[in-house]
């Protein structure tokens, strides 16, 4: 499996091993090759910080600056900024 990551930090969903949400308003993407990216969450209540049973979806199979979170009461968009390699 090859890593698809453009210079503007667009990551293909197949290259993601794990998505973590921290209590310090960070989202972390751990990739299958061991690389990690971190971003600052813009609206904390829209991201699944404490609950891990939500389903998440990515638009066009790419990770850019948001993802869609499916909850029991509908959908919301979790957005972040400053996605950088850590």
Image (spheres, grey):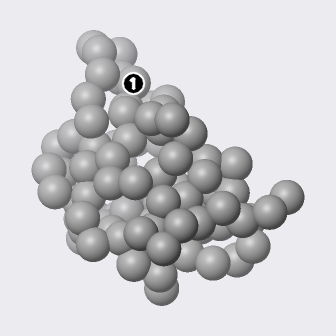
Residue at x-position 48% and y-position 60%: 10
Judged left or right of residue 85, residue 39 is left
Residue at x-position 70% and y-position 77%: 34
Q: Position of residue 16 (x, y in %)?
A: 64, 56
Q: Nearer the viewer, residue 61 or 18?
A: 61
Which quadrant of the view contains residue 28?
bottom left
Q: Locate the N terminus by quadrant.
A: bottom right
Judged left or right of residue 73, residue 32 is right
In this rendering, the answer to whether 63 lies above or below 74 is: below
Residue at x-position 28% and y-position 44%: 78
Q: Which residue is mark 1?
A: 70
Q: Nearer the viewer, residue 35 or 50?
A: 35
In this rendering, the answer to whether 72 lies above or below 30 is: above
Number of marks in picture = 1
- Quick one: which residue is furthest to the bottom in this view? 86
SS state under label 1: strand
In this rendering, the answer to whether 70 lies above or below 68 is: above
- Quick one: which residue is furthest to the top in this view? 73
Q: Position of residue 51 (x, y in %)?
A: 40, 41
Residue at x-position 80% and y-position 63%: 2
- Quick one: which residue is furthest to the front in this view? 7
Q: Position of residue 14 (x, y in %)?
A: 69, 48
């Amino acid at each position: 499996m090859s890593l698809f990551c453009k210079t503007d930090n667009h990551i293909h969903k197949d290259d993601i091993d794990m998505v973590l949400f921290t209590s310090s308003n960070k989202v972390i993407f751990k990739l299958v090759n061991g690389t990690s990216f971190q971003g600052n969450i813009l609206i904390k209540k829209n991201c699944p910080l404490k609950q891990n049973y939500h389903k998440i979806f990515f638009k066009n199979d790419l990770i850019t600056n948001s993802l869609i979170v499916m909850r029991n009461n509908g959908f919301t968009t979790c957005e972040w900024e400053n996605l950088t390699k850590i």
